[in-house]
Image (spheres, rainbow, N blue to C red):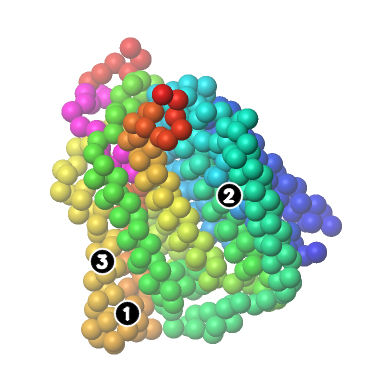
């Protein structure tokens, strides 16, 4: 098993862990964390894929995509957090009272 | 062998941290674990020869995300057990009501589906060829024409400049959405900043501005660029807000709006000019490419930094406060 495969498998596990938490956890702030963990998993698969280059020089295209992804992820997080702050407590379906 | 042991340790630490942060009962603890998780990700990027990504992850993914999450937790006014109630869970651990037969079946079905998803993805990762050059050769062959010598910057701002244009658009759009939701409850005024924070900020901020400028300039030939520099500059802005130095608050609203839109505007103008001149979006002439990239990156740096600070403070800088100098910081 090569290093790249190890990190790719790690990325896949992170993505799955994040998906499971996103679907099962009820706290909204934790759902935001879970979405970020999912994103990190995807980035890890991409960068590990770029590391497989036989010349030793990693593929710069996935690197640029991940940089873009990190900025999009923080935009998503910031917007989600503000929406969370605007939520009226008790307005969700399934809340007590 | 040593390297492989390190790889295994890093991957296991990542998974363990992710598990801990998703399972921790206390939200504050979960956020701190998330920040540590981000720093471990940065280590992994450095290990996988991705220094550009490592810089961005350490500054944005770990630092600024952490600041945003902690600010949001502070705004909600509660942490830990109180937060569970407020966030509206029937049971803290899972979203499924215990004892309900249909929901238990749903939960089991979900678990099976997730295991299926994990299996498929593991298989897909496993069958990937161990060596693959991807687009490395194509990028290396065209580096001479890109105007810069750092391949990641060349891809970001020349070969795939379209992606980056849209990305800065997404950042601006997030800010517009946040601002359109109205003012958030103030939180920065809850506790006056301590002497150490204020003195430290005054010492550190000029250096951070210098580092941001250096990262922007170095991005042409070494790891760095507008995103990494913008994140460092944004961290300086967050420090200014926390230390209650009224530099950002004294900026007129129109100037803030103009600066936040500057990066996208400059990028869009350059792209339209290229479209007019050559019929292709962002198709620089090789001789001028370096200058165009520097212009776009400088504008983007300012906008990225300002948008990130504004997102941290909830879309607007809080006005009408006593300037720090006129107030006794220790009370």
Earlier residue among tags 1 and 3? 3
Mark 1 and mark 3 on one chain: yes
The tag on residue B281 is 1
Which chain letter matches label 2?
Answer: A
Q: Do the residues labelled 2 and 1 touch (CB within 8 Å)?
A: no
On the image, the x and y values in percent for residue B53 come to 53, 58
As measured in the structure, the alpha-carbon distance from the residue carrying label 2 to the one carrying label 1 is 37 Å
Give the position of the N terminus of chain B as an image quadrant. bottom right
Label 2 environment density (alpha carbons within 10 Å; few <14, some 14–19, many ≥20): many
From the image, state whether disc 2 or disc 3 is nearer to you.
Answer: 2
Give the position of the C terminus of chain B as an image quadrant. top left
Please name whichever residue, A72 or B161, is drawn nearer the observer in this view of the structure: A72
On the image, the x and y values in percent for residue A12 come to 66, 57
Please name whichever residue, B213 or B124, is drawn nearer the observer in this view of the structure: B124
Q: Is residue B35 visible?
A: no
Q: Give the range drawn in magenta.
A: B309-325
Q: Which residue is label 2 attached to? A: A19
Q: Which residue is label 3 attached to? A: B266
> In the image, what residue occupies the spot 30% across and 24% down?
B189
For residue B279, above or below residue B301: below
As measured in the structure, the alpha-carbon distance from the residue carrying label 2 to the one carrying label 3 is 38 Å
> In the image, what residue occupies the spot 27% across and 82% down?
B275
For residue B18, above or below residue B229: above
Q: Do the residues labelled 2 and 3 touch (CB within 8 Å)?
A: no
Does the magenta segment cover residue B122? no
């Amino acid at each position: 098993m090569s290093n790249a495969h190890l990190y790719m498998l790690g990325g896949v596990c992170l993505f799955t862990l994040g998906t499971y938490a996103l679907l099962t956890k009820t706290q909204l702030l934790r759902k935001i964390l879970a979405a970020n963990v999912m994103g990190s998993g995807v980035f890890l698969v991409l960068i590990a894929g770029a590391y497989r280059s036989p010349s030793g020089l990693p593929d710069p295209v996935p690197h640029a995509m991940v940089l873009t992804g990190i900025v999009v992820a923080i935009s998503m997080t910031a917007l989600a957090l503000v929406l969370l702050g605007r939520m009226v407590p008790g307005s969700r379906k399934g809340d007590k009272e | 062998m040593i390297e492989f042991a390190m790889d295994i340790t890093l991957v296991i630490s990542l998974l363990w941290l992710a598990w801990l942060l998703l399972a921790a009962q206390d939200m504050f603890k979960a956020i701190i674990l998330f920040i540590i998780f981000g720093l471990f990700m940065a280590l992994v990027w450095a290990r996988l020869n991705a220094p550009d990504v490592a810089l961005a992850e350490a500054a944005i993914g770990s630092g600024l995300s952490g600041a945003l999450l902690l600010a949001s937790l502070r705004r909600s006014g509660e942490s830990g057990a109180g937060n569970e109630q407020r966030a509206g869970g029937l049971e803290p651990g899972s979203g499924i009501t215990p004892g309900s037969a249909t929901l238990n079946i749903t939960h089991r079905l979900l678990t099976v589906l997730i295991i299926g998803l994990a299996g498929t993805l593991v298989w897909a990762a496993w069958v990937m060829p161990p060596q693959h050059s991807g687009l490395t050769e194509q990028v290396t062959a065209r580096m001479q024409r890109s105007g810069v010598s750092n391949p990641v910057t060349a891809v970001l701002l020349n070969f795939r400049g379209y992606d980056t244009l849209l990305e800065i658009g997404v950042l601006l759009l997030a800010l517009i959405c946040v601002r359109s939701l109205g003012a958030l409850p103030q939180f920065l005024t809850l506790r006056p900043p301590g002497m150490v924070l204020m003195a430290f900020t005054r010492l550190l901020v000029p250096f951070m501005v210098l580092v941001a400028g250096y990262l922007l300039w170095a991005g042409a030939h070494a790891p760095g660029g507008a995103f990494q520099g913008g994140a460092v500059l944004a961290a300086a802005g967050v420090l200014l807000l926390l230390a209650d130095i009224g530099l950002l608050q004294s900026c007129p609203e129109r100037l803030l709006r103009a600066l936040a839109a500057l990066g996208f505007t400059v990028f869009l103008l350059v792209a339209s000019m290229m479209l007019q001149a050559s019929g292709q979006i962002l198709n620089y002439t090789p001789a001028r490419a370096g200058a165009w990239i520097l212009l776009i990156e400088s504008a983007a740096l300012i906008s990225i930094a300002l948008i990130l600070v504004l997102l941290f403070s909830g879309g607007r800088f809080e006005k009408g406060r006593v300037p720090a100098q006129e107030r006794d910081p220790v009370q």
